[in-house]
Image (cartoon, grey):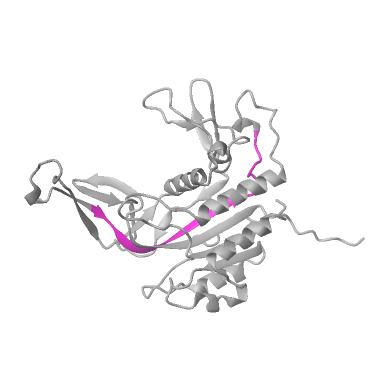
Amino acid sequence: METVNQTPNPNCLNIAYIFKTSIGSINGSWTEGNVSTVKKITTPNGQQIPYVSGQSLKYQIRKAWQEMGLSHLLSEVKQAEKKSGVDNTLGEPHNYIDDDLLGFMIASSGENRRRTAAVRASAAIGIFPFRNDRDLGTKSKEKTGGDVGSGGNIFETEIYYNYFRVNFLIELDRLGVFQDYELSKTHKGKVESLSLEERRQRLKYLLNAIANIWGGGKQSRLLTDMSPKFLVVTLQTAKSPIFLETLTVTEEEELNTTAIKEVLQGNTNIVQHNFIGVQSGIFKNNVAEDLKEFKPDTVQNTFNSILNYIDNLVF
């Protein structure tokens, strides 16, 4: 009897990208005196690397959905019963895209339940060390009759020139699929998984948000673009963030394309399809030429290609 090999449906979409900040202070940490600091981690050699938390990135996605006119698909945020408690959403993933994709946790006297996010997010990790650069500002007293000559109250903000790498892993087999323990008592046993078309649409909304993501701290005077300047997206049959530690840029601001090729060539057993986009004029090397075997395009055209591909994607 002849055996027919069937290609399994992908169970995850892996999105990795690099964005650049010429000057930014995206995600703040504790204030030290009159200095607004940025979040940092310390490497084994003692260098400090700035980062933007995954929580901050998900907040920017939620904000992007609002700006896309999708507020009706976002769950209402409810105040915690106790002042010391944590605010929570309605926890209805069948009705609201953020409860579905970004997850929730509800801990109250009436119920305790949660949904682990179907969208897993890394922090955005700076590729270069923090150099202790600061932006000097003043709170002017010119209009209030204070001591104008002294220049007003001085404050400082930590800033950086850097490239950041990000990784999202979307669990396609959980997007729009719900378990009874995630649902309220009134919905247990009564909620079906979303249709394939609805799941595709939610995935498209997520990709559109990532394509246009912007925000973070100090945007009124340090406007920052967090959208991808190099983008690689893979459809996979194994949930592995294969690019998480791969995307790097040299001190000459050249993208390490050799490492990207190694990952793609070494994971053909789990990668069913890949998309690559690069914005010209950002990196000093010719990324498109280096990766020509993978048919790179512009970042925006790449997002459009992915969105078109999703129209026929079964997951």
In this picture, is 50 found above or below 261? above
Q: What's the residue at 49%, 78% (across, down)?
A: 286
In this picture, is 154 found above or below 298? above
**Image position, residue 299 (x, y; %):** 53, 65
Outermost residue on the front side: it is: 143
- Specify whether 76 is left or right of 8: left
What type of secondary structure mainly makes up the magenta span? strand
Along the line of sight, the residue nearer the viewer: 100 or 3: 100
In this picture, is 249 found above or below 59? below
- Specify whether 47 is left or right of 165: left
Q: Which quadrant holds the N terminus?
A: bottom right
- Specify whether 297 is left or right of 226: right
**Image position, residue 300 (x, y; %):** 55, 63
Report the label total.
0
Residue 307 in which image quadrant: bottom right
Answer whether residue 161 is magenta in the image: yes
**Image position, residue 311 (x, y; %):** 70, 54
Outermost residue on the top side: it is: 110
Q: What range is drawn magenta here?
A: 157-179
Answer whether residue 47 is magenta in the image: no
Along the line of sight, the residue nearer the viewer: 58 or 259: 58
Q: What's the residue at 54%, 40% (across, down)?
A: 98
**Residue 94 in view (yes/no):** yes
**Image position, residue 172 (x, y; %):** 64, 49
Q: What's the residue at 54%, 75% (across, down)?
A: 288
